[in-house]
Image (tube, coloured by chain):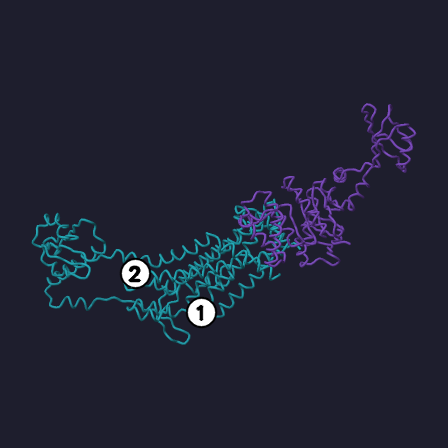
Chain colours: A purple, B cyan
Amino acid sequence: MKLIECKNVSKSFGEKVALDNVSIDIPKGKIFGLLGPNGAGKTTLIRIINRITIPSDGSVIFDGRPITQEDVEKIGYLPEERGLYRKMKVGEQAMYLAQLKGMSAREASAELKKWFVRFGIESWWNKKVEELSKGMAQKLQFITTVVHKPSLLILDEPFSGFDPVNAQVIREEILRLKDEGATIILSTHNMESVEELCDNIALINKSKVVISGGVDEIRRKYGNNNVEVIYTSDSSLQSSRAFKVLSDIDDSGRHTAVLELAAGATSNEALQELLNQKVIVNSFKELVPRMNDIFIKLVTEA
Amino acid sequence: MKLRNIKTIISREYLTRVQKKSFLLITFLGPVFFAAIALLPSIIMFMAEDKGKQIAVVDQSGIVLPKMESDATITYHDYSTANPDSLKTQLSDLEMDAMVLVSPLDSATNSVNVSAFSNSPISVDLKERISDKIDEAVEDYRISLYDVGDLKQIMNEVKSDVNISTYTIGEDGEEKISSSEVFMIISLLLSTIIYFFIAMFSGMVMQSVIEEKTSRVVEVLVSSVKATELMFGKIIGVACVALTQFLLWIVLTAVLVTGVSAFVGFDTMMGDPAQSEQMMQMTGQMSGVDMEQMAAVTEGDGLGVIISTLKEINYGQLIFGFFIYFALGYLLYASFFAAIGSAVENEADTQQLQMPITVPLIIGFFIAFYAFKAPDSAVVFWGSMIPFTSPIVMLARIPFGVPAWELALSIAILVGTFIACGWASAKIYQIGILMFGKKTTFKDLWKWLRMK
């Protein structure tokens, strides 16, 4: 099931093309990573899904039908550049943003109180926003993003500005919201959290989608068919018909080698060859590339 | 446009402003200031009035003393036989406030030299009163020298003091006595108020747009509501603040003026026609005091004319005009200022972009001043039709009377312009609020306007 479908979305600002024929599907109830270098067009795409910006061409389908202004109440958006009214009180500020998302005053107050208790910040209610530290303001902003129980959450660099403890709190909240059925678009440059959290990704570079799909599938696809072998032997492994030895580190008889499997060769054939060469195999592991490497490879090669 | 969103926005814009300390300060200090302007002259006169002055007169001419008749405020005492030099040192022992020394009559000029001595300086008012009496005495003496029997009476009879009564002829041919000065003052007051209100509250809108943009809260807002809802919600919210402030000013000023008048005593306020004229306008306008009632209280030709003039003004048109032109003029300028606020990242950058907007507003203010002198001139007519100046200029014209069709045409043009400019401003605004980095030029604004 897809919650969002972007169909051939293009956007240009005068001469400048921000998005060029972008089509992506965002599955329901999953975490979707939106990746890309700065200036690639991610923010423009997010704003189009949010209906802040109207696309020059193409359409956005929300839950099976073209998105309307009514749907923005079902979206929660945490922009990369955070911002709150500095002079407003924390409680009033949160109430205002919740009401703009269609909540009644009573509903908003009840839900906000729950969140404030959960984050242990009940005492902030009557403080002014300008009195909060950066991390505190981030927490408040996160609450205002999720308080109306959006079915789609768009989080742009949600961990920036948080210390590791609070980043972990936010990470857990994101996973909890996913378990409760929310679909989450995560735009980040932190590839570790992509690997950890995302089910699917799309990588945008120079206004175009370069790659999209499941995280595991993509990592495997960009694996070079390499395996890591740890073995014990007096001599080193030799390249053969089944594989080529890329590297071999000998630590007093205990070797760690990276082998590139020959085209068409299976891991069984490689293992057979290892046995033929009379080494004792301690570990045989498929090498999957880090998202970070795939990102750099795709962006720099383009 | 979703009404519920706009309501939420209006109430935030309104409440955050009226709860500010600066709003409360201006709202409560304003009337004190207005009331002070209205009442100050009267209060100063009241405080400064000489009461029960004791004046010792040493008349060496013999002609002055008979004219020095004591009255409620000054009592003259005859010390003509005393030695002036020793009297001077005894003033406080004798409980005299001052000593007036009149020299013997100079037979060459038929005049006298007068000196006054006192321990504390005597007021200008007291000095004038004494010199009036002495002038009268000297004049009478000179008249008597001509030895023409009733010369004094003849002189009184030939004295002339012509005063022009101005009448305006109504459509029904009825002549009404009026004073153009009164029209001028009302006209000046109205156009000044509307100018400052438009400039002040439009500026407030711009400031608030810039604040939302630089604090980046705007991106969250427009992910919930449409940019146009945000812009018009803000404009209307600030307009409500303006109306609240204005109504509070009227009520508080009226309370203060009537309160202080009652405390000080109304008849002393009415002492000087010039100052009562000023006060009546203030109180009349601010509190809506019944003019006929005031007319009954006061007497004298000058006041009669003022009251007649005030009665002649079409207050319905005036009040309607004030609110409609404030509302429309503010909407027009506030939407311009909102568009400019959206295009910049700090207030310093607004200077250049503001120019084409503030200039017409200031021109309007100058034309309004011309309207006091020549309400029927072509410049004033066109000024009251062109929508960028009409809110100010038309308001200046209204006290002098404006034909209904001109009023209707001017309002229609203003409404049409607001719709067109409001639409254009909203377009610029929704793009501008998300633009960062590059400094915006007029070329950019034009580009945004044409962007789809």
Taking the image as shown, residue B4 lies to the left or right of residue B156, namely right
Q: Quadrant of the N terminus of chain B?
A: bottom right
Count numbered badges in the picture: 2
Please give the residue where the numbered disc 1 appears in the rendered image.
Answer: B316
Residue B56's quadrant in the figure? bottom left
Residue A74 percent location from the top left of the image: 68, 56
Is B278 left, or right, of A247 in this rendering?
Answer: left
Residue A88 badge: none
* Residue B153 visible in the current orientation: yes
Frontmost residue, B206 versus B158: B206
- List the residue tagged with mark 2: B264
Image location of residue A296, percent across then percent down: 74, 38
Residue A225: percent from left, percent from top: 84, 37
For mark 2, give the secondary structure: helix
- Percent position (x, y) of residue B404? 48, 70
**Which residue occupies the foreground of this view, B212 or B140?**
B212
* Lower sequence index among marks 2 and 1: 2
Relative placement, left or right, of B405 versus B2 is left
Task: Pick the residue in front: B366 or B269.
Answer: B269
Label 2, label 1: how far apart the Cα atoms are? 32 Å
Q: Which element carries disc 1, helix, strand or loop? A: helix
- Residue A17 seen in the figure: no
Instruction: Name which residue type carries label 1.
Output: Gly
- How crowded pointer 1 is (Cα within 10 Å; few <14, some 14-19, many 20+) is rated as few
Output the chain of dot 2.
B
- What kind of residue is marked 2? Val
* Quarter of the picture holding the C terminus of chain B: bottom right
